[in-house]
Image (spheres, rainbow, N blue to C red):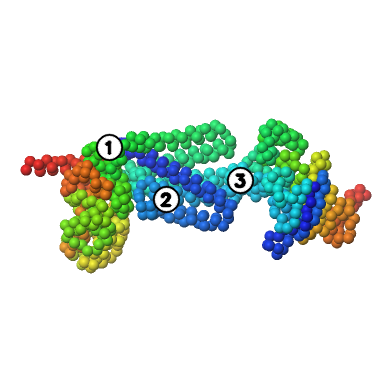
């Protein structure tokens, strides 16, 4: 589906490489997570897929087409994009925000409106109630639902997500993660998501790509990574959620004893 | 009486307001059309930001009146154009800076979202950045509007008619009603425009059609109402351009310009006043045919325009000056009006008696204990240097005043000697003594009627104005000035007095 071939990025003409010779195949309908600490190159990699950042070297091929030969604006309209900042347009209503890409693609009014309502319902926001509201009148979780709806509006096959749930409170985040996973599976979306939250990665991903200093360290399913001890960095990363789970379990058991 | 004065001022309002509004609107529109794209460019090409914003800031720091005056020699003409360009420059900073600030201030996550969903740079600008920056941009336009309406009042001295005509002539002729009408009208216009733009903004943010219609009607009423009189005037006058009569910024000049205008009008030649022009601006305008005629003073031309330091005899000076003007500029000196308005040192009668002096020669012995007051120009002029050299004058202190305040200062004893104007009505009013000049340090200042090259070629103008030559003597001019400066009469009343006197004199002469 998406083929990343020896892609590098340098901002100083090769002095340093925030992303260095990445090779990655993203399968159709899979949810792939790029995991790593801040500055490991995961967000840069993500943004090179829709050319918000231009690669310095290498190729990215989507459905057999080299993205370098596609107009970046057309490319982005075919790919959903959701990020932590959400970035809803504050001067537009919820409905207008969701309708923006269909409008850019010059869909007719009727088709656009029914699509907006369909998406609002899909996101659990009754259209009559939410369509005419301004983003400022919504909670953070509702705003990100609208953000996801906007990204899905033109029916893209691919979604890029940059820490989409990072700014939400834990309960809202948990709910949205679960909902989004269902949505992704039912729509058959191909998703590349960036996160530094190990638990989120383990619970949502079909496969996880661990990155460190611009390079890929490991690629594997959550189960494989949890048991993989061959890479010290990956092992160290995975130790954290495991330790937290053990401690939570211990806490629960000790209460039960008392 | 007071109502009369007010009514006479209000009669001028349609013309002044119309011209003021036109100047303001055209300057603002041009300012916006230039600065708005420039600001957008600056947000895209960051290195341009510093030079362009700095240029706009520098324009803003130049005092409005200086910026306006600078445009005249730069463009080589007076009137609408220099005022327009100066005001455009003046409007730049708020429009530029607010547009740049507004666009730069748009939330980065919104920009990223716009790019991320596939907006082109243009779509991002028009659908996201400009709508979100609109309140800040409009605030800039409102600031510019208020500034330009206010600064436009300063365009009177460069020859553009505006509400400033009230203020400049009112200050000079001590007509506080005129000053108040001018200030009040300018303030009202500024507030009205500002509020209408605010209404447009409210209508846009609230997407209220009703508010939009109200704001639109309001703006149309202001613009339409303000511009109608001058449009009608322009249509009715299209056939033949009026003779333009210039005047500098003091009472005597207003009276003489009105005298000439009335004389021409009564002879069936349409004529109009362009008053309150700067002294050298007026001369340049005459040379360039922007102004058809005005009255200047031989000594002023001699020292300031020809830049001569010697002081020949009166008739010699007049002859040489006339020849020089004709050869150099094609300007024709039609002839002296018959009076002299010279700089003269004046002292209060009380002090003159106390010191026992009647000439500058005798003054010089006492000067080191005295204070001299003067207008803005005098201490920079060759006459002052000549006086100091020829009489070895050294005063204890030199002080500079607005001409009106200079007379008040000698009346109150704040200064002992002033550089008075010899035709000034206030010399008699305040009981001042004009000191004799036995060494002829002060050149003659005969009032001379000057015609532009174009006007000089017209027999009808020359013929109509010739009777004014030699018709106004010192005493008549002093009385006319006194009527306006001290008795509170209008310029028109003073002109009527002059014309009556000229008529009586010619009748008493004819029978002989």
| Residue at the outermost left position | B512
Residue B4, x across and y down, in percent = 29, 36
Task: Find the distance from the CA under tag 3 to the CA under tag 1.
Answer: 63 Å
Task: Find the distance from the CA under tag 2 to the CA under tag 1.
Answer: 39 Å
For marks 2 and 1, the one nearer the N-term is: 1
Residue B481, x across and y down, in percent = 23, 47
Callouts 2 and 1 close, C-beta under 8 Å: no
Q: Are marks 2 and 1 on the same chain?
A: yes
Q: Identify the residue shown where x is 31% and y is 54%.
A: B280
Q: Are marks 3 and 1 on the same chain?
A: yes
Residue B327 appears in view: yes
Q: Residues within 10 Å of mark 2 (few under 14, many from 20)?
A: many
Task: Find the distance from the CA under tag 3 to the CA under tag 2.
Answer: 32 Å
- The residue nearer to you, when weighing B76 against B88, is B76
Q: Identify the residue shown where x is 83% and y is 52%.
A: A208
Q: Identify the residue shown where x is 48% and y is 56%.
A: B55
Q: Which residue is mark 2?
A: B86
Callouts 3 and 2 close, C-beta under 8 Å: no
Q: Residues within 10 Å of mark 1 (few under 14, many from 20)?
A: few
Callouts 3 and 1 close, C-beta under 8 Å: no
Q: Which residue is mark 1?
A: B1
For marks 3 and 1, the one nearer the N-term is: 1
For marks 3 and 2, the one nearer the N-term is: 2
The quarter holding residue A218 reads bottom right
The chain under label 2 reads B
Q: Which residue is mark 3?
A: B122
Residue B110 appears in view: no
Image quadrant for the N terminus of chain B?
A: top left
């Amino acid at each position: 589906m998406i083929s990343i071939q020896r892609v590098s990025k340098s901002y100083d003409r090769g002095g340093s490489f925030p992303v260095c010779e990445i090779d990655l195949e993203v399968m159709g309908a899979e949810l792939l997570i790029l995991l790593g600490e801040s500055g490991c190159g995961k967000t840069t990699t993500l943004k090179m897929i829709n050319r918000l950042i231009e690669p310095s070297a290498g190729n990215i091929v989507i459905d057999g087409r080299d993205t370098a030969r596609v107009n970046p604006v057309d490319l982005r309209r075919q790919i959903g994009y959701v990020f932590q900042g959400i970035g809803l347009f504050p001067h537009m209503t919820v409905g207008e925000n969701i309708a923006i890409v269909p409008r850019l693609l010059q869909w007719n009014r009727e088709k656009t409106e029914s699509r907006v309502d369909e998406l609002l319902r899909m996101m659990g926001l009754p259209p009559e109630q939410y369509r005419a509201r301004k983003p400022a009148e919504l909670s953070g979780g509702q705003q990100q639902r609208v953000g996801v709806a906007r990204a899905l509006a033109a029916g893209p096959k691919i979604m890029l997500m940059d820490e989409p749930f990072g700014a939400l409170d834990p309960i809202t985040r948990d709910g949205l993660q679960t909902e989004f996973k269902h949505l992704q599976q039912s729509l058959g979306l191909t998703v590349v998501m960036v996160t530094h939250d190990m638990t989120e990665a383990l619970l949502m991903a079909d496969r996880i790509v661990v990155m460190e200093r611009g390079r890929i360290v490991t690629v594997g399913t959550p189960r494989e990574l949890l048991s993989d001890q061959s890479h010290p960095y990956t092992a160290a990363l995975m130790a954290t959620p495991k330790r937290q789970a053990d401690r939570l379990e211990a806490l629960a058991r000790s209460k039960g004893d008392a | 009486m007071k109502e009369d004065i007010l009514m006479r001022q209000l009669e001028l309002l349609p013309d002044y307001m119309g011209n003021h509004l036109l100047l303001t609107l055209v300057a603002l529109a041009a300012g916006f059309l230039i600065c708005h794209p420039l600001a957008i460019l600056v947000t895209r090409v960051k290195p341009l930001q510093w030079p362009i914003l700095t240029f706009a800031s520098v324009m803003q720091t130049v005092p409005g009146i200086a910026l306006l005056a600078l445009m005249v020699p730069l463009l080589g003409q007076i009137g609408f154009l220099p005022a327009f360009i100066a005001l455009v420059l003046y409007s730049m900073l708020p429009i530029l800076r607010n547009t740049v600030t507004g666009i730069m201030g748009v939330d980065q996550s919104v920009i990223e979202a716009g790019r991320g969903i596939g907006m082109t740079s243009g779509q991002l600008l028009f659908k996201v950045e400009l709508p979100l920056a609109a309140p800040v941009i409009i605030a800039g336009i409102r600031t510019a509007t208020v500034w330009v309406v206010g600064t436009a009042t300063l365009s009177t001295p460069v020859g553009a008619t505006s509400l400033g005509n009230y203020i400049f002539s009112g200050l000079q002729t001590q007509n506080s009603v005129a000053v108040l009408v001018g200030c009040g009208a300018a303030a009202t216009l500024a507030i009205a425009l500002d509020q209408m733009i605010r209404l447009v903004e409210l209508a846009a943010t609230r997407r209220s059609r009703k508010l939009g219609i109200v704001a639109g009607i309001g703006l149309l009423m202001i613009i339409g109402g303000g511009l109608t009189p001058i449009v009608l005037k322009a249509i009715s006058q299209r056939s033949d351009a009026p003779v333009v009569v210039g005047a500098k910024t003091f009472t005597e000049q207003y009276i003489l310009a009105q005298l000439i205008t009335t004389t021409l009008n009564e002879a069936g030649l349409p004529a109009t006043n362009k008053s309150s022009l700067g002294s050298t601006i007026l001369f340049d305008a005459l040379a360039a045919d922007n102004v058809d005629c005005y009255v200047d003073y031989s000594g002023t031309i001699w020292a300031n325009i020809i830049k001569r330091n010697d002081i020949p005899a009166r008739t010699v000076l007049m002859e040489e000056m006339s020849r020089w003007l004709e050869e150099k500029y094609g300007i024709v000196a039609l002839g002296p009006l018959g009076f002299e308005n010279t700089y003269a040192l004046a002292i209060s009668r009380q002090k003159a008696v106390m010191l026992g002096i009647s000439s500058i020669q005798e003054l010089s012995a006492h000067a080191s204990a005295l204070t001299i007051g003067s207008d803005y120009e005098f201490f920079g002029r060759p006459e002052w240097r000549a006086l100091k050299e020829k009489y070895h004058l050294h005063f204890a202190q030199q002080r500079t005043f607005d001409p009106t305040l200079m007379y008040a200062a000698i009346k109150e004893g704040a200064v002992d000697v002033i550089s008075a104007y010899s035709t000034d009505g206030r010399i008699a009013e305040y009981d001042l003594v004009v000191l004799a000049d036995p060494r002829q340090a002060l050149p003659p200042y005969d009032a001379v009627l000057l015609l532009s090259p174009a006007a000089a070629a017209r027999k009808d103008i020359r013929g109509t104005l010739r009777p004014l030559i030699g018709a106004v003597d010192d005493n008549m001019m002093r009385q006319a000035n006194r009527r306006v400066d001290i008795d509170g009469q209008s310029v028109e009343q003073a002109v009527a007095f002059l014309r009556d006197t000229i008529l009586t004199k010619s009748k008493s002469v004819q029978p002989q």
